[in-house]
Image (cartoon, coloured by chain):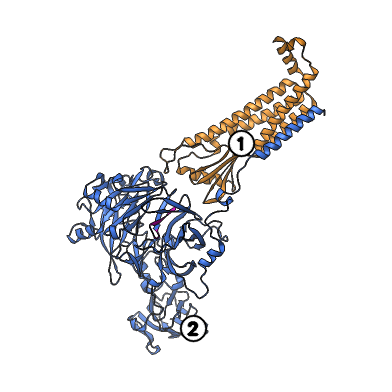
Amino acid sequence: MNLQNRAVWARVSALVVLGLVASQCTPSQPASRRAGGGVQSDAAVAAQKTYVAPGDLDEYYMFSSGGHSGQIYVYGIPSMRHLSTIPVFTPYPATGYGFDDDSKKMLGELTWGDAHHPALSETKGDYDGRWLFINEMNGRLARIDLRDFKTKQILGPVPNLHGNHASSFVTPNTEYAMMATRFSRPVPNRVVGIDKYATEYKGIIAGVKIDPKSGKMSLAWQILMPPFDYDLGDAGKLASDGWMFFSAYNSERATGKLEVTASQRDLDYIAAVDWRAAEKAIAEGKGDVIGGVKVLDPKKVPGIVYLMPCGKSPHGVDVSPDGKWIIGSGKLQGVTTAFNFEKIQTAIRNKDFTGDEDGIPVLKYESIKDAEVPVGLGPLHTQFGTDGWAYTSLFVDSAIAKWKLGTWEVVDKAPMSYSIGHLAAAEGDTVSPDGNYLVGLNKLSHGRHLSVGPSQPESSQLLDITEEKMKLLYDAFTEPEPHYAQIIKADKIHPIEVYPKEENKHPLAVWDVKDAGVTRNGKRVVVKMVAVRSTFTPTSFEISAGDEVTVAITNIEQTTDELHGFGLLDYNINLVIDPGETKTVTFTAKKSGVFAYYCTNFCSALHQEMQGYMVVK
Amino acid sequence: MQTFLQRANRFLDEPIGLAARLMLLAAAALLVATYFFPLWNLTMFAPQYPEGLRLDIYSYTLVGGNNGQDVKEINVLNHYIGMQDLVNESFTEFKWMPFVIGALGLLMLRAAAHGTVVALVDVTMLFVYFGGFSLWSFGYKLYRYGHDLSPEAAVQVPPFMPPMFGGQQIANFEVYSYPRAGSYAMAGVAALLLTALAMTWWQARRRVPPVAADRG
C-alpha cells in the first residue's frame, strides 16, 4: 500500500471513530432515574418518620377497600403495618365469617362482592369514629361498627340500581349514604333490546337513610336518571351542605365498545342532587313505587337534580374542605376542573341552562366553572390538606400533583410506582384535613418487591406532605385491590376488646357449664356449648342422621385476645367466637359416624386438648 | 468537452485495483450484517414502564423487546389515541428491502469480480440512492403513524411527528429513536464504496494523465 492510500485509510478510520463518538443512542433508563431523582426522602429521615417501635402504636388507622376480595384491610399509619382484615362481602375462615348463622344470612347467596369506597361516619363534616360504610357492585352497602370492627348490616341488593359504584359517600352528619348505577338497565328490570339503551335504559341515584342512633341503613328514595355510567360521588359540606355530587361518563348513552363509543364527547356530566329537596318530595308523597321503592322522576318532580358539564369522562368528584368548590377530574384530559358552588346556585336561580337531558336541566359550563387546573395526564381523584392544598392523582402520568385551591397553581409532582388510582390523605375528605400523611393507592407494583409470581399485590405508598415538596416515605404492598381508603386519627376510635357478659342477650347463650347440653324437639336438636380454656362443654354429643342441629357456642372468657375456634371436621363448619360472644351454626346431620370438633384459634398451653366428638347415629 | 467525456469513458472502462476489489467484497460481507442486526430502535419510557418498551426495526421485520411483548404493549397503548397498529403487514419496506439489499450485494460482488470502474460507480450510486430512499421512507412512515389518528379515539391528541433521531416527550412517554448496528453497517458499506471509488479515481489520475488541451 502506498503512502497516499495510507492517508486515505487514516482519514476513513478517523471518520468512523468520530462518527461512533458523536453518535448517540437510547439511554438505558428514563430521565427521572438517570437524574437519580424522584421523591425518595433521605432514607434515614424516612425510616425515622415511619418507624413505630415494637410495642408502640400508630397515629392513624387506614381503612383500605379490598376491592373484589370483598374485605376491608386495616393499616396503621405511619408504619403501614397491616393490623387486621374486616370481612364484609366474602366469607373469611380466619374469623369464621360467613360460616355462622348470622353472617351467612347477611351474605345471602352471594359469596363475593367488589368493595370500592369506604366512608367513615361524620358529625359536622368530621369523622366521628362510629361506623364505616362500604359499597359493593352487586347493589349492596355494608355497615361496620367501629366499636368491635365487625360487619353489622348488609343492605341490598337494592332494586332498580345496577352496578353500585358511585357509593358509599356519606353526608356531613351521616344523614345519608349514597348509591348509584354504573350499568344502566331497564327500570324495573326486564328484557328490553340493548338497541333501545338510549331511551329505555335508566340510571338510578339512591339515598340510603342512616339511623343516627343505631346506624341502621334503609333505602329512602331513588331518582330516575338518564342512562349514563355514574362513577363516583361526594357530599357537599359547609357551604354546599344539602347537596350530593355524582360524576357520570358515557353521556353519549353508548353501548358496545365503550372505550371508544363512550369517549366521544368532550364534556360529560357531574350530577348535582339537592337531597333535602328529594327528602321533601318523598315526604309530600311524590314519586312512583317501582320494585318496592319510591322513585322520583325529575321530569315530574323538577328542582331535585341538575347536570354540570365536566370534561372528559369524569371520574372523581371531590368537594373542598370548605364546601366552596367541587373538583371534577376528567380522566381523559390533562386538567381537573374546579366548579364554584355559589356560581352553581346562581346559575340554577337564573335558569342559566344550555339544554336538558331527559328533563334534567344542564347548567352552562362557563357560568359555573372557576378554573381548569393543569395537573397532568389522567387526573382521577382529589384529596385535601391544610391551607387549601389539594392533591390530585394522575393515572397516566403515574404521579400526584399538588396544587392550591383559589390560586390554581400546581406546585409539585410526586411520581408514584405505578399507575395511581385513588389517594387518601389523613382525614383528607373532611372539613378539617390534617395535612401530614398521604397514601397513594397504586394499581401496579411490578419490580418494587420480591417477586411473588403472576398474581401481584397492589402497592400503597406513604408520602409526607408536611413540607413544600412531597416526600415518599414507604412502600407497602396490599391485597387486591385498594380502591379508596379512609385515614382517621387513632384517638377517634375506641374499640372494645371483649364483649361484656352483661351485654350478651343471645337466647342460646350459656355462661355456666352446668347449663350446657343437648335439647331435642323432634328432629330439631339444639346443642348449647361453653368454650373456655381449654375445654368445650359438652366434650361430646350424640345426634341422629337427618337431624337439624343448631350448635350455639358461648365463649365465656372475659380476657382480651382469648378467642376460641370451633372447627367441625368433614362438615365444613368453622367458627371463631370472641370473648363474651355467642355464635350459632345450623346444619343437617347428613353424614353418620364420629366427627371431631376442636379449637382452631390457639388459646392456651392446652389448646391441643380442647377437642370433642359429635356422634351421628 | 468532448475530450472530457472521452477521458471519462476511458476512466469508466478502466479496471479497478486490488484494494478497491477487496473493499467491495468487504462491503458485500458487511451487508450481511443488516440481516442479523436491527437498523433502528425506538425505546419508550414512562413512569409505569421504568424498564422501557423497546422496538427494534430490522430490514425485514419488527421485533419487540421482552420477547415481542413490548410491541404488543405499544399497540395496546397506541390504540387509546387511535394510532394504527405497528404490524409487519403494514410495512411494504419489509418486502422490498431485503431483496434490494441482496441485489446490491450481488452487484458489489459483480463489480469486485468484473472489475471496471463503471460497475463500481453504478453500485455506489444505487446504494447511496437506496440508503437515502430508505431513510425518507422510514421518516414518512413515522409521520403517517403520528398523523393518521382515528377521529373516534378515546383520547384525542394533536397529530405529531415521532422522533426519528433523538429523544422527545410525548404525553407521559419519553421516546428515543436512534440507528442501530444495521444502520451503522449500511453506513460502513457506503463508506467502503465511496473510499473504493475515491482510491480508484486517484490511481486512474496517475495512470491516465490528462492531455494538455483538456487543461485549457
Q: Is residue B149 above or below residue A102?
A: above
- Report crowding for label 2: few under 14, some 14 to 19, many 20 or more residues within 10 A (C-alpha): many
x, y (%) of residue B66? Answer: 59, 48
Q: Chain of mark 1?
A: B
- At label 1, counting other C-alpha atoms closer than 10 Å, the crowd grade (few under 14, some 14-19, many 20 or more) is many
Residue A389: image x %, image y %? 40, 57
Chain A rendered in what hue?
blue
Residue at figure coordinates x 70%, y 22% from the top left: B121
Q: How many marks?
A: 2
Chain of residue at mark 2: A
Q: Residue at x 37, y 42 (%)?
A: A264
Residue beneath label 1, please?
Answer: B60
Q: Can residue A176 be seen at all in this image of the molecule?
A: yes
* Left or right of A383 in this view: B180: right
In the rendered structure, the answer to whether residue B5 lies left or right of residue A603 reads right
Colour in which the image shows chain B: orange
Whether A230 is drawn above or below A121: the answer is above
**Identity of the amino acid at label 2?**
Met
**Magenta span covers which residues?**
A384-395
Foreground: A370 or B109? Answer: A370
Q: Secondary structure at mark 1?
A: loop
Residue A166 occupies quadrant: bottom left
Residue A275, percent from left and from top: 25, 58
Disc 2 with disc 1 on a shared chain? no
The amino acid type found where label 1 is placed reads Tyr
| Rendering coords of residue B78 (x, y %) | 49, 43
Residue bearing mark 2: A610
Label annotation for residue B177: none
Circles 2, 1 touching at the beta carbon (< 8 Å): no
Any magenta on residue A272? Answer: no
Q: Does A292 sit above or below residue A7?
A: below
The residue sitting at 58% across, 53% down in the picture is: A36
